[in-house]
Amino acid sequence: MPTTTIPVKRETWARLRSYRVGGATYDDVLNDLMDDCPPAGFIREHLRRLKEEEFSDWQDVRKRLRL
């Protein structure tokens, strides 16, 4: 099966590594984590925020964050 490289910060890699137990691969770990939190929940939350929270223009966000 083909593989790919995913760039992550060292801190993220260290956190991910802590989930690797009993000979599990990083692929196993990532799939277990994604199975525990399916995308439907993320999508529902995103749609809720779009509907209920105040919209901020990107230029306003950049100004507020001084970017």
Image (tube, grey):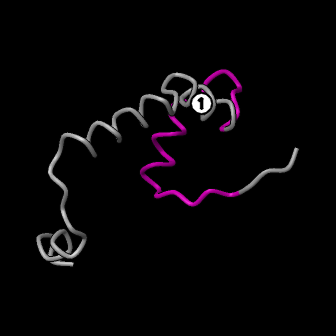
Q: Give the magenta part as a residue range.
A: 5-26
* Residue at 85 percent of width and 50 percent of height: 2
Q: Is residue 36 left or right of residue 67?
A: right
Q: Quadrant of residue 61?
A: bottom left
Magenta residue check for 9: yes
Q: Nearer the viewer, residue 11 or 45?
A: 45
Q: Is residue 6 left or right of residue 45?
A: right
* Residue at 42 percent of width and 28 percent of height: 41
Point out the residue furthest to the right here: 1
Q: Position of residue 36 (x, y in %)?
A: 51, 22
In the rendered image of this protein, does residue 58 appear above or below residue 16? below
Q: Residues within 10 Å of mark 1 (few under 14, many from 20)?
A: some
Q: Quadrant of residue 7?
A: bottom right
Amino acid type of the residue tagged 1 in the rendering? Arg
* Residue at 68 percent of width and 58 percent of height: 5
Q: Is residue 1 left or right of residue 37?
A: right
Magenta residue check for 25: yes
Which corner quadrant holds the C terminus?
A: bottom left
Q: Position of residue 32 (x, y in %)?
A: 60, 25
Q: Determine which residue is flagged by label 1.
A: 20
Point out the residue furthest to the front here: 51
* Residue at 34 percent of width and 40 percent of height: 47
Q: Is residue 63 left or right of residue 58?
A: left
Which corner quadrant holds the N terminus?
A: top right
In the rendered image of this protein, does residue 51 appear above or below residue 28? below
